[in-house]
Image (spheres, rainbow, N blue to C red):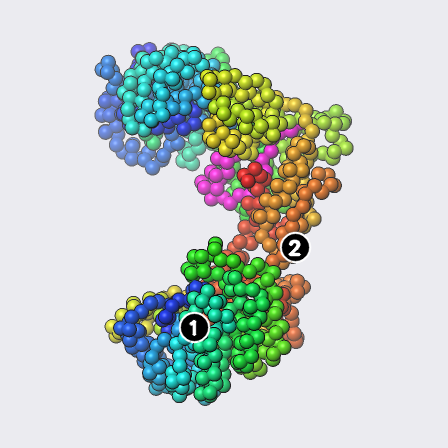
Amino acid sequence: MKEVSVYVHIPFCIQKCYYCDFFSAPADDQLKRDYMSALLRQIEMTEWDNRIIKSLFIGGGTPSVLPSFFIEEMTGRFREKAKFAPDCEISMEVNPGTVDREKLSRYFVCGINRLSIGLQSADDRELKALGRIHTFSEFVDAFEAARMIGFWNLNIDLISSIPGQSPESFQRTLRTAAGFLPEHLSVYSLILEEGTEFYRRRNELVFPDEDTVVKTDEFTREYLREKGYVRYEISNYAREGRACRHNCVYWQRGTYLGFGAGAASLIEDGDIHKRYTILRDVKEYARRMLAGPENLQCVMTDIQQLSRRERMEEFMYLGLRMTDGVSAEHFLHDFGIPIREVYGGILDEMTVKGLMDVEGGGEQERFFLTERGFDVSNVVMAQFLLT
Amino acid sequence: MDQQKFIRNFCIIAHIDHGKSTLADRIIEKTGLLTSREMQAQVLDNMELERERGITIKSQAVRTVYKAKDGNEYIFNLIDTPGHVDFNYEVSRSLAACDGAILVVDAAQGIEAQTLANVYLALDHDLDVFPVINKIDLPSAEPQRVIDEIEDVIGLEAQDAPLISAKNGIGIEDVLEQIITKIPAPSGDTEQPLKALIFDSLYDSYRGVIVFFRVMDGNVRKGSRIRMMATGAEFEVVETGYFGAGQFLPCEELTAGMVGYLTASIKNVKDTRVGDTITDVANPCTEALPGYKKVLSMVYCGLYPADGAKYPDLRDALEKLQLNDASLFYEPETSIALGFGFRCGFLGLLHLEIIQERLEREYGLDLVTTAPGVVYKVYKTNGEVTELTNPSNLPDPSEIDYMEEPIVSAEIMVTTEFVGSIMTLCQERRGVSRGMEYIETTRALLKYDLPLNEIIYDFFDALKSRSKGYASFDYEMKGYERSELVKLDILINREEVDALSFIVHAGSAYERGRKMCERLKEEIPRHLFEIPIQAAVGSKIIARETVKALRKDVLAKCYGGDITRKKKLLEKQKEGKKRMRQVGNVEIPQKAFMSVLKLDND
């Protein structure tokens, strides 16, 4: 039995947030219906063989804009076609402005055991400035409803360094969010991405300067540590044992399959490792799937076979996103060569510069970023490219 | 000889933007490529044409055929002259290959500094010059005023000057007819020994050097044994021909009065210097044509390959460029910061830019250029005199008695309202006024002696911006004068970067140093540590800036769909590093080495 993780992308939103560059598209009801049918078709056509689903993540976009019967139907379809591990983590992203108690109950009933609730800020003016469609009090309702229903694994998404946001205001947001005692917190330092509303308005917006960003991140780390959260990745914090298992698969280069327009996959077939993405065009994806294709090739794009060198690079720059870093044993297992033979010089250099640290020895050796290393992680990770 | 009656060799001279190339295009358009007799021959010889196709010649010269109103067919050889003061010597050789010149003057702007300089140069070469008034269709055109100006200022008969618009094709016939009446036919002697003037050359990888020349006396044909009189090199001619529009058209022979090319399996352009005289080995002429000189470089800079491994490629490319351009000088040098490269000498800053661009474009080289400088004379206390082309070679101050720098005589023509601001500019650049003349009530000619090192960077731009584009400028070398000069060193992270040092007048050292530091602060990316940038004269620090340490560079989100993009970002980061030079533990972008060029842009 091979473990696999599954990601389902729901590229619909009521309104696109001003900072967001994730793939989403406007859609009428007919297109949504077609898209749902297409997704079900893709699940059916996938060769599940002996694979067992270790985690399922329904993300977007805003998956909660779809009617809840569809989530029931889809999870049902997965159960029909594939096996779920007994401890399978099934996550779903929800926007507080799109759910009520009934919807959440239905999610719970169909097996979803982890919700990621997008709060972003506890200040209604900031929410508006971010283009969010909900208020803080709607978040409170959604969060409390989820707890009442019995969700025991909840994440709250936050954004720091919002244009115009004072450090104090962010600190209030963080304290407020932590006060709800979620099992998990994701705190993203805002990145200005091309193609977003913020990018278009970048000249009129006031972004916090670098020193403020550094201080804000420091506060986040310190405060959440005090409150008993462990930072396990650049932007992710969790109670002991409550790290998002699905997301860890991305960083540890586990196998995952993407469903729906814009969803990415990493598959392993013998010695062949491939990344590909499903067409980033909702209509075209739906059209091709509903036409009853022979296989799924016709909706795949950006197919990229990874060389051994590329896999080593990924191993490093993805693995180092996590505070546990990368292990010598794991590297040796994957590539049949000691990590120090490939990266010894750079690892030593980074350690001397105080950007990385080492624990253990021999095969037990583990390499990870220091806090300073995390702050400038792009600089460090670029060192591990081999060309 | 009868044939010469129907040949006209001429060039077009003009101030920049007065319409020289547009007029040249119109002349080529309104005339034919071949005479009617040649036309038949060419049709038969179509294969030959095919063979030549695909080789585009840089249009240094073009031969066209004009059927005049008198019923005769005339051959026009239009010889292009470079339009920049850097190329004065080339201009003078091109002019020497002509019998006359068309002077194009803008009907709105009238005479400008380069107009004057070019006309005087043409008259010096005994060319018959006739004026043409261009752009008469502009609303602001004042042809009569310009005609009077030409007569008053230059003393050229201009009342019957063709009034044309080259852009709109107005009056071109007039110009063509006047070429016949106002420009004399060549008057060489075919019976005399061969005497021909090289005015340009081109290197072709199949045929070797293609020499562009004007036959003064005698004739040259395939199989002739020829000698270059200045270099002494001898060759057997493989092919002669003339210049079609973008093609080489081979012909039997070239005789006195004709303009054309020859190939002779010439491997080395150093053997075919512009200005040299070609003669016949068996029957040489007694003396060479006057005016040949070995040109001297005025501006020097270091050229380094961005990728050190490309050093041999750079050497080969420079060698090839020198085939075409004997005025390009280069010799190997080594820099601590930049590795192996070449110290190169140029006629001027434009020449430098052209060479740099050709190296990058035609030879695909990525270059690092150091700050251009002029040739200083260093008088040492032990009585020795050295010429300094590389600031790094400046002897220890204790060994220097004094130094001299090159000075030019400049003429600036400007409308009277800007005289004040231009005078200020010249004073800022350490200019010494040599008088002022009024050309007419609204325009003045300012004469200044200026240090060459004050004008090589951006003087022209400054002139344009301070006169709203109305000033025009020309200069010639005057000589050397004693000056208070110092070497300005740049220290990055407390290490001296030799490739950034330059010589500057003591009075401007502080200002230059400050600007240089500011500039470098913008160019050098932030590192993980703080980097001080200092300017120093000797051991004294005169300016300082700091590049702050990089504190934050993170991709906050990286999930399944972001990985490919994430990799691109890291690759870009790494790629950027490749375009950097490591000095100590600081990565300096290659363009920072040229930042000294842009000191006055703010």
The structure residue drawn at horizontal position 67% and vertical position 38%, both measured from the top left corner, is B510
Q: Does residue B450 appear to the left or right of B114 in the view shown?
A: right
Residue B439 picture location, percent across and down: 47, 17
User: Which circle, 1 or 2, is nearer the viewer?
Assistant: 1
Q: Is mark 1 on a helix, strand or loop?
A: loop
Amino acid residing under circle 2: Glu
Residue position marked by numbered label 1 in the rendering: A134
Alpha carbon separation for disc pair 1 and 2: 44 Å
Q: How many marks?
A: 2
On whether disc 1 and disc 2 are found on a single subunit, the reply is no
User: In the rendering, at what x and y percent does residue A145 appear?
Assistant: 45, 84
Residue bearing the label numbered 2: B530
Q: In which quarter of the image is the N terminus of chain A?
A: bottom left
Determine if residue B595 is in view: yes
Residue at 65% from the left image edge and 47% from the top image edge: B545
Q: What range is drawn magenta here?
A: B351-378
Question: What is the secondary structure assignment of the residue under circle 2?
Answer: loop
Question: Could you say which quadrant of the image residue B56 lies in?
Answer: top left
Residue A125 % position (x, y): 48, 67
Say above or below: B564 vs B127.
below
Q: In this view, does A313 lie above or below B171?
A: below
Viewer-closest of B146 and B127 = B146
| Mark 1 residue type | His
